[in-house]
Image: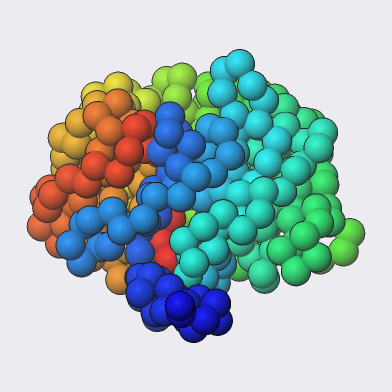
């Protein structure tokens, strides 16, 4: 008989785990209620981890050891939890009950804390993993607060779909300020330029993109962004903006400086989530309707391959370098 302690050691040695120095693509499968861990060297799913119901967006800790999932829920059920995923052990460590905070969606990490939107509550909130507590909630006063981004200067911007606005929170100085910025109809996807000077916001309602000056918090330009620019993502060098268009099934590549369209890449049915590798060489596009993640070579602007992570993939994140 193998002693219990020795048996545990043998089990740990025989179980593959993620080293902290490794890099992995994380994909949320909304219909499966799972998070898939994908090896970006061979594009294989190495683990699938259960989450809460209707996981929509995911972010990782700075050290790449943890993932935090916003469990949005379904049409019938209002989600109100965050899944904390241990990426080394490949399991859900805990599920954070958010109580009255409903429909968590957009999610980011800053300074070790997790900021997220609460769509039903018209608010943003902050979760502290160290204390396992929500330690901050602030209202936007706007309808359907959905996605959010945060600058290095601790400015948070939210897209408020049904109010046709962006809310700008400035926590860089005391007292903090809140500014409501009118944009086009049904704003949802948004991203900050790497230098923090511009915020690009896609309008689902008219296919345009508002470009905001983050110093003045005013729209300085409006450009065309396809039929439905539901997600936008800057490349790390700030030279290009990738736009997913679920109506056309394309990924649009725009030149940031000139605002010109460089290329349209056919990716499949209902592309939504976009992720760019930290080195800027590849992009990943979740095609929710096709059940695939399309891998794009950003140097050649061509499709490398397609990954099948699960049903209705959407939210994407990167763990590691």
Residue 150: which quarter of the image?
Answer: bottom right
The picture places residue 175, in percent across and down from the top left corner, at 89, 59
202 above or below 163?
below
Residue at the extreme right of the image, as rendered: 175
Q: Is residue 302 visible?
A: yes
Give me the residue at 32% from left, 38% from top. Answer: 310
Taking depth in this image into account, of 145 and 183 the one nearest to the observer is 145
Q: How is the image coloured?
A: rainbow
Residue 70: which quarter of the image?
Answer: top right
Q: Quadrant of the N terminus?
A: bottom left
Total marks drawn?
0
Give me the residue at 87% from left, 64% from top. Answer: 174
Residue at the extreme front of the image, as rendered: 1
Give me the residue at 67% from left, 25% from top. Answer: 78
The picture places residue 37, in percent across and down from the top left corner, at 37, 56
The picture places residue 12, in percent across and down from the top left corner, at 44, 75
146 above or below 19?
above
281 above or below 274?
below
Taking depth in this image into account, of 4 and 201 the one nearest to the observer is 4
Taking depth in this image into account, of 103 and 35 the one nearest to the observer is 35
Q: Is residue 183 visible?
A: no
The picture places residue 161, in percent across and down from the top left corner, at 59, 26
Q: Quadrant of the C terminus?
A: bottom left
120 above or below 293?
above
Give me the residue at 36% from left, 31% from top. Answer: 312
């Amino acid at each position: 008989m193998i002693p219990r302690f020795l048996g545990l050691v043998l089990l740990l040695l025989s179980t593959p785990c993620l080293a902290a120095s490794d890099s992995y693509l994380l994909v949320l499968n909304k219909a499966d209620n799972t998070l898939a861990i994908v090896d970006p060297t061979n594009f294989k799913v190495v683990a699938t981890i259960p989450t809460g119901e209707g996981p929509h967006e995911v972010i990782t800790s700075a050290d790449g050891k943890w993932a935090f999932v916003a469990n949005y829920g379904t049409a019938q059920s209002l989600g109100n939890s965050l899944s904390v995923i241990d990426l080394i052990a490949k399991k859900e460590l805990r599920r954070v009950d958010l109580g009255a905070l409903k429909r968590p969606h957009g999610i980011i990490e800053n300074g070790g804390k997790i900021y997220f939107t609460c769509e039903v509550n018209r608010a943003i909130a902050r979760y502290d993993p160290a204390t396992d507590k929500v330690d901050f909630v602030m209202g936007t006063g706007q309808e359907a607060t959905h996605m959010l981004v945060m600058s290095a200067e601790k400015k948070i911007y939210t897209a408020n779909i049904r109010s046709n606005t962006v809310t700008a929170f400035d926590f860089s100085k005391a007292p903090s300020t809140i500014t409501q910025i009118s944009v086009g109809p049904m704003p949802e996807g948004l991203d900050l330029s790497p230098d923090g000077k511009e915020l690009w916001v896609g309008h689902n309602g008219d296919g345009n993109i508002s470009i905001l000056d983050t110093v003045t918090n005013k729209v300085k330009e409006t450009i065309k962004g396809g039929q439905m620019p539901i997600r936008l993502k800057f490349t790390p060098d700030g030279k290009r903006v990738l736009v997913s268009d679920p109506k056309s099934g394309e990924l649009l590549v725009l030149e940031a400086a000139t605002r010109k369209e460089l290329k349209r890449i056919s990716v499949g049915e209902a592309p939504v989530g976009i992720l760019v590798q930290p080195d800027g060489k590849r992009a990943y596009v979740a095609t929710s309707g096709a059940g695939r993640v399309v891998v794009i070579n950003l140097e050649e602007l061509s499709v490398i391959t397609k990954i099948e992570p699960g049903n209705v993939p959407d939210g994407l994140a990167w763990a590691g370098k």
